[in-house]
Image (cartoon, helix red, strand yellow):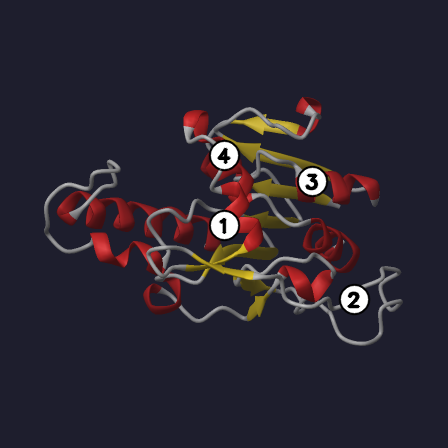
Amino acid sequence: MRVLLACEESQAVCIEFRKKGHEAFSCDILPCSGGHPEWHIQGDVIEQLDKGWDLMIAFPPCTYLTVTGNKWIKDQPKSKRGSLVGKERRDAREEAVDFFMAIANAPINKIAIENPVGVMSSEWKKAEQIIQPYYFGDNAQKTTCLWLKNLPLLYHNDKPNLFDQEITHVEREEIIVSKSGNRMGSWYYQTGMIPLKDGQRAKARSKTFPGIAKAMANQWG
């Protein structure tokens, strides 16, 4: 099966599909960090959507789609951190929505789109499934939405051997409360220690957790 991993530079899911014998390629405007440039298409994924893929799993950028960015939508003074605000933010969100929908409407039979809780549930439709890394054995909490086309929900109940994979729920990770009152999982807090230089923090936070990557390859592959 020909599989496109759209907007994936980490190759976390691509590698799992390759292990299952599929012709999988990651695609991103950034060079890959997964160690297999021979399985990576560097460039605009929109230009790859009509290349005869059987399955696409997409991870479109969520910066301007998440609900956490709603505070910057209204007209206000510029952010000290350099975040877009007001009209610039609204324009960036509109562009992000258009990109998301271009992926959703791709001429590919099977599609999964992953994103955190955000505006697409109102701009388009509610996600078919919401999952957590701890559903699949990773000690982390990260609410993740899946929009699915011709694909089943990711299985994670009490029959771990059904897909030749041990899928075990683990306890939710520790939640840390910052001085400002923000609540975050310990994994997210730890990635906050990574310097902002070269987008390394964003890369770490966007990488697919191993248990979810394996479940996608085992079940959708």
Residue 192: x and y in percent read 47, 42
Foreground: disc 1 or disc 2: 2
Marks 3 and 1 sit apart, C-alpha to C-alpha, by 19 Å
Q: Between residue 50 and residue 162, name the one nearer to us.
A: 162
Q: Between residue 8 and residue 108, name the one nearer to us.
A: 8
Type of amino acid at the residue the image marks with label 4: Ile
Residue 4: x and y in percent read 62, 42
Mark 1 or mark 2, earlier in chain: 1
Q: Residue at x 69, y 40 (%)?
A: 14
Foreground: disc 3 or disc 1: 3
Secondary structure under tag 3 reads helix
Marks 4 and 2 sit apart, C-alpha to C-alpha, by 29 Å
**To which residue does mark 3 refer?**
14
Type of amino acid at the residue the image marks with label 2: Thr
Which mark is drawn over residue 106? 1
**To which residue does mark 2 refer?**
168
Residue 221 appears left or right of 83 = right
Residue 80 appears left or right of 172 = left
Q: Are there few (<14), some (14-19), or many (20+) residues within 10 Å of tag 4?
A: few
Marks 1 and 4 sit apart, C-alpha to C-alpha, by 35 Å
Q: Residue at x 26, y 58 (%)?
A: 70
Marks 1 and 2 sit apart, C-alpha to C-alpha, by 34 Å
Mark 4 or mark 3, earlier in chain: 3
Asked if disc 4 and disc 3 are in contact, CB closer than 8 Å, the reply is: no
Type of amino acid at the residue the image marks with label 3: Cys
Secondary structure under tag 2 reads loop
